Image (spheres, grey):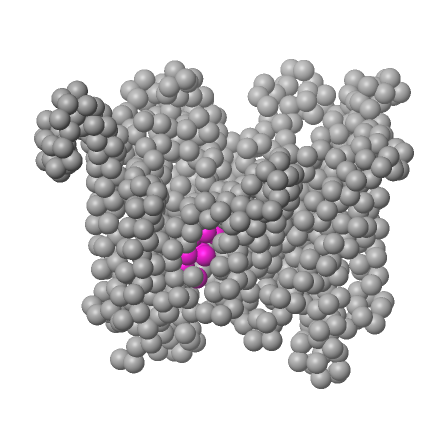
Amino acid sequence: MIDFLNSIIVLLNFIIIPGISYGSQLALGALGVTFVYAILRFANFAHGEIMSFGAMITILFTWFFQSQNIGLGILPTALLALPIGIIATIILCIISDKFVFQYYRYQKSVPVVLAMVSIGVMFVINAIIRIIIGTETIKFSDGQKFIIKAKQFKVMTGLNEGLALKSSQVITILITILLLTFTFWFLQKTKTGKSMRAFSDNEDLALLSGINPDRVVFTTWIIVGVLACVAGTLYGLDKSYKPIIYLNLVLPIFASAIVGGIGSPFGAVVGGYVIAFSEIMVTYAYKKFFVYLLPSSIEPTGLVQLLSTDYKFAVSFSILVIVLLIRPSGIFKGKVL
Amino acid sequence: MKFERYEWLAIIIMISLFIFVGFIQGWSVSLVILNMCIISAIMTMGVNISWGYAGVINFGVMGFLAMGGLAAVLVSYPPIAESWQVGGRGLGISFALLVVLVIAVMYINKTVIQKRNRYVLNSFIIFFGILIIRHFYLNATHNIEDVNPAIAGFLGGLGLPIIFSWIVGGLFAAGVAFVIGKVALGLRSDYLAIVTLGISEIVVSVLKHEEWLSRGVKNVIGLKRPVPYEIDLQNADWFINLVTYLNSSKLNNIIDVSDRQQVLNNLIIDGSGIFVKLSYAILFLIVMLIIFYFANKAQLSPWGRMMRAIRDNETAANAMGKDIVKQHLIIFVIGAAIVGVAGAMLVTLDGLFTPSGYRPLRFTFIIWIMVIVGGSGNNLGAIFGGFVIWFSWIEAAPITTFIINQLTIGLEPTNALKLHLLDSVPYFRYLFMGLILLLILRYRPKGIIPEKVRHS
């Protein structure tokens, strides 16, 4: 029985908790990509850099607050700076729409052109971030680091395995739940949300019924800004902020959005968790788990690892390819908000 | 073929850029930039063939370049007999098993009709097949990586002259492209962009981590050159005579013998560097012109016309009996092969293979900016885009330094803002690239040298 509990703790510690927190970050990112795809109808390659930008502003204000000795006690100061980061990200999104994307929308350009344009935007934001904050790795989480420490847990329960719960993970999960609830409530219950859904379902019909497209687009960018900034900051808080990481993060985010069915918000969230869990589960070495569970005579000798951790990113893409082959519209039928 | 007036203008601009840099920053710098420009132009032509001719998007440039680089290693590096001894058999067995596995899956796909049975059977076979293969494979690779890890630790290559790898690189890239095309080419263009980007990422991560094949992050250095080494040139009589002859008027003015020898030595050292770069430039230029010639021929041929028809109206072309899936696959493979050639050339020029150096920003998106800026569908435009964008990529740093110094001329040299800006000079090139792309897409969406509309 003890062995069984130990093995469960191993899973919880190394797969489930990291999976949920990483999945939440991916889900928020993928939700942003999906919104742009459903309303503006293009694949936004700049999304990773928008996330990075939000995180950067948050970091700058975190530093400012820290220098003024303003803090939240046990919570990281970044939470205090997050609203400012969100506002800055929204402004960035709206500026990039006004000066760049709007023109192509009015021209009714094909999606590929808009994707190219978003690459241009990606380069510009990327340069701005590097010019402002450099390329160094930045750790900006402060406050209490752990909610449960591995050692404490061992003493508390008397088990061999410790369970470490980082506060950044709990914050990630809580904020994600909050934000997702709000987003889905907004889409289902409010008038603006309903008009957005109508617009994404059938643009012409929506225009006929008097929905103002500019307003829908404006709202979309606000939502995208909030989601991107929160996702970027949470990722930075959890793992440490590094500007070049966010370009690599775009690929798993796209994978999540497509796996879930691009254009479907619920699908994007599910896709985020699917990608996160498969990345972690495929590359985790299960030796410890089996050592507890199996009798010592048939204990595994190797690491019992399907793929080495080097292939983390490759996993998300293999899943993407498989899903596209078997069910091109994603798990949940996409294209409708 | 005939060039229009503005095309001649573009060619003259390209040439004068290098002459200008040659006089300002020295010929060595100019030739270094020229070599990379030519390679970039070849990559751009590769992308242009699939995107410009047929509208097939290819964001996997980085992966195909890496395959070309791998070819350069596998062709030119001397074979490591010891590695083959300890791991050759294991690898052979696992490869044979892999072939068996693939055949089994194909057989099942053909014979089992019910969809659910097929999936279950396939996943069962693949799972256990991989378990068995892994056993042999991991043993073999482990042994290979243990052979003298500081200098070897991989299988080595064939020990052939590296110039062959340019063709092999093309074939490697074509092979990978064939697989990708089979899997992904039915998708909508923006999905295809994401999928190719992802698969190229997978290719690079395989090269990064399969150390028995490519030495992974430990890099392969000291690949043999197709051109002479500087040190050999400096000791070769004919080269010394050549330098003396070319600089005879300058040398004759110096009367003192030891002074004269000193000047001559310096000239020889400088000259050997320039000679090597010039030889590279000539080799690359030959390849570029060959590809350019055939690309143009193909574009003007009935096949090229069919490609344009498919690009402009897929349904109509299909109704006329053109096999769109097949043609898309063909053009995707050809484009990738040309990129692979460029990848092999890139490694040849550097003389080293660094898998971790392949990053999408540098090797996929920049190439795409070249294509868009130059003009998709026009080969000269592709070359022009490659030249201009690479040129500004390199020259962005000096220009930015100059601009920042001018703008902050009123500030003291220790001013924090000024120092910070000067520190971040390397990042301004991304800003330039982004702005160039956005401006071109906005005001000249067909590129600087647009495709010629042919009414034939």
Q: Quadrant of the C terminus of chain B?
A: bottom left
Decide whether residue B367 is among the magenta residues. Answer: yes
Q: Looking at the picture, tell me which residue is in the foreground, B94 or B22.
A: B22
Residue B328 in view in this figure: no
Q: Determine the image quadrant of residue A138.
A: top right
- What x and y, as percent, mark residue A164? 79, 27
- What x and y, as percent, mark residue B453? 33, 76
Q: Which residues are magenta?
A: B363-372
Task: Give me the residue at 54% from left, 52% from top.
Answer: B431
- What x and y, as percent, mark residue A188? 82, 66
Task: Give me the residue at 32% from left, 32% from top.
Answer: B351
* For residue B36, above or below residue A282: below
Position of B40 compared to A298: left or right? left
Position of A200 compared to B430: left or right? right
Task: Give me the residue at 45% from left, 69% from top.
Answer: B444
Q: Looking at the picture, tell me which residue is in the foreground, B140 or A256.
A: A256
Task: Give me the residue at 26% from left, 71% from top.
Answer: B4
- What x and y, as percent, mark residue A181? 83, 55
Decide whether residue A221 is among the magenta residues. Answer: no
Q: Looking at the picture, tell me which residue is in the foreground, A306 or B360.
A: B360
